[in-house]
Amino acid sequence: AAGNTAAFALAKALLQRKPGQVAAESYVRTGLAECIGRLGAAARGSGAVALSKALQDDRDAAVRRRSAMALGHLGHIAGKLGASALVRALKVDKDLLVRCRCAEALGVVKSGEEEAKALVEALRGNETEVRWRCAMSLGKLGPMAGKEG
């Protein structure tokens, strides 16, 4: 129960980004995202939701990168919401390293065919850094990835 309480508190803080709020500074949000990722199963629910939201709409690329990494640390606990956020960011985020972290995390989240399809699509892109991470993640997905190849 203490882990769930911590996850809720960290998740709530991660989303308090306005000036004067607890996570107004990007370095604080980056640290919060990392902490949520380290909570493991306790981050189910509120932690995964906050990381997904930060990945989708935080103004700072470092926070988005750390959120993607944290969702990867959560693995299957990130759930469908986390996997969907990773897919979306892999496709549309303007920061190369955010897309790289999303590709890596999708190999660990192991959610389903939609994620494998997104990795295959990104594998066909022009960015070597993203392509090789997609290849590694598709290897981790195993037979699930074969449905999209």
Image: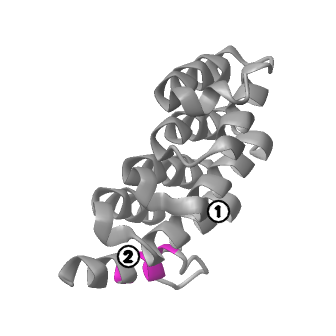
Q: Give the mark, 2 or 1, whose residue is nearer the N terminus.
A: 2
Q: Which mark is residue 33?
A: none
Q: Residue at x 37, y 56 (%)?
A: 34
Residue nearest the observer in this picture, 85 or 143: 143
Residue 71's spot in the image, x, y percent?
47, 53
- Give the vertical position of 127 relative to 93 (above or below): above
Residue holding disc 2: 10
Residue 51's spot in the image, x, y percent?
52, 64
- Give the vertical position of 47 relative to 80 (above or below): below
Q: Secondary structure at mark 1?
A: loop
Q: Secondary structure at mark 2?
A: helix
Q: Residue at x 51, y 84 (%)?
A: 21
Three-letter amino acid code of the residue under disc 1: Asp
- Mark 1 surroundings: few (<14), some (14-19) or many (≥20) residues within 10 A: some
Quarter of the view holding residue 115: top right
Residue holding disc 1: 58
Q: Is residue 22 magenta?
A: no
Is 87 placed left or right of 107 in the picture? right
Q: Is residue 13 magenta?
A: yes
Residue nearest the observer in this picture, 52 or 34: 52
Q: Residue at x 46, y 75 (%)?
A: 45
What is the residue that sits farthest to the left in this orientation? 2
**Please, which colouring scheme is shown?**
one colour
| The magenta segment | 9-14
Distance in Å between CA atoms under marks 2 and 1: 16 Å
Screen quadrant of the C terminus: top right
Residue 50's spot in the image, x, y percent?
53, 71
Residue 118's spot in the image, x, y percent?
73, 37
Three-letter amino acid code of the residue under disc 2: Leu
